[in-house]
Image: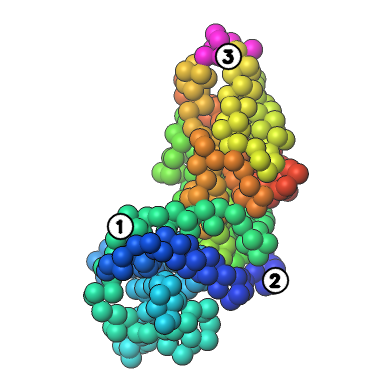
Amino acid sequence: MLKTKITDYSISKEEYKSRCKKVLDFISQLTEDKSKSVGLGKLILKSGSEQVFSNDVHYPFRVNSDFYYLTGFTESEAVLILDPRADNPLTLYIKQADKNMIIWEGERETISSATDKYSVDVVYDIKDLKDENLILDEAFQEKILKFIHSLRAIKSSAELNIMRRANEIAIQAHSMIPDLLCSGVYEYEIEAQLNNVFRSQGANGWSYPAIVASGKSSCILHYIKNNQKMMAGDLVLVDAGAEFNYYASDITRVFPVEGSFNDEQRDIYDLVLKCQEEVIRIIKAGMPMNLLQEKAFSVLGEGLQDLKYINDKNNLDEVKKYFMHGIGHSLGIDVHDPGLDRKTDILIEGMVITIEPGLYVPEKAIGVRIEDNIVVTRSGYENLTAGLNK
Ligand SMILES: [Mn+2]
């Protein structure tokens, strides 16, 4: 059996409270000069509803990410209202279980348990929420959500601890892969082993469906069929991460299915690795995100020209034929976390981003992407994925 580490990865009530306070202050600022028309002046957030898998079976419920960020509350059918002008600015409405639900699904939070546990001012039953309290002004809501996303982009030390653990679990899963690979093994067998480690280490599960893509499929960016038999001579691209305490990890590695890379595979792999290392090296607070993308284009362009894949390293269209996606994205409660614009934003201390250059040559069945998760610090970076070979 795999041993599970026992450590406190919770986020304090005070931290949730201070997140909500920032949002309340922001709403107050926005509404200072405005009329008190209905729907303006408050944020209404829903935790989400269960989704049907088939007939009367549901997918496991996963709470809305903004709702989780502000409350830590994870049950369905709840509503959070942030209204700085109300007597109770933070109000949580929850769906309590009736006798029948307790028999089939077990306990849910009650008014009293939720009042104890969550840092809101008051908790009511969802049945007491009047429809007129749900009228909202979409444009106003969007502004508040954008502000929440800017908060979410910068991680606290408690969040970073959770994300370190999400990475540790994913590293443990990825580390097993080389021993499992040989000709005749199916891609889904690797997927199964990854999910096994995620769950047995206490993660919620995957943070996105694992990509196990061998041969030509390694060039399909979001391949999730994972149903091919892997063959000697193929390479396999594995892009998989765990969600731990609602925070994602997102790691990609590429391996030869049997033996070692052939020369063409090796050339591409070495170039992507060189690019990733050079991009990571220049990360620090104050660095514009688009310079990371430009750095990747320049390293890959030069390498592709040397390898005679392209004629002109400065012709971006030629480079983009082989590297057609972004260098990375913000990572957090969502695997593609909001709050960081790749074209315009500047890195800030406490942001967590992925760095994932790739090169894809379908005609040679070579798809290589190498992806680590990086915390931006004042003077540089912390690589959360440093413990995994590449
Ligand atoms: Mn990614």
Measured Cα–Cα span from mark 1 to mark 3: 45 Å
Q: Quadrant of the C terminus?
A: top right
Secondary structure at numbered mark 3 = loop
Q: Which residue is mark 2?
A: 7
Dot 2 and dot 3 residues touching (CB under 8 Å): no
Q: Earlier in the sequence, mark 2 or mark 3?
A: 2
In the rendered image of this protein, does residue 259 appear above or below residue 304? below
Picture residue at 54% right of the left edge, 57% below the top? 151
Q: Earlier in the sequence, mark 1 or mark 3?
A: 1
68 sits left or right of 176 in the view: left
Q: Quadrant of the N terminus?
A: bottom right
Picture residue at 55% right of the left edge, 10% below the top? 312
Q: Which x, y percent locates residue 276?
A: 65, 33
Q: Which residue is mark 1?
A: 138
Q: Residues within 10 Å of mark 2 (few under 14, many from 20)?
A: few
Q: Which residue is mark 3?
A: 313
Picture residue at 70% right of the left edge, 71% below the top? 7
Measured Cα–Cα span from mark 2 to mark 1: 41 Å
Dot 1 and dot 3 residues touching (CB under 8 Å): no
Q: Amino acid at mark 1?
A: Glu
Q: Which x, y percent locates residue 264?
A: 61, 20
Q: Which residues are magenta?
A: 306-315
In the rendered image of this protein, does residue 193 appear above or below residue 372? below
In the rendered image of this protein, does residue 329 appear above or below residue 279? below
Q: Amino acid at mark 2?
A: Thr
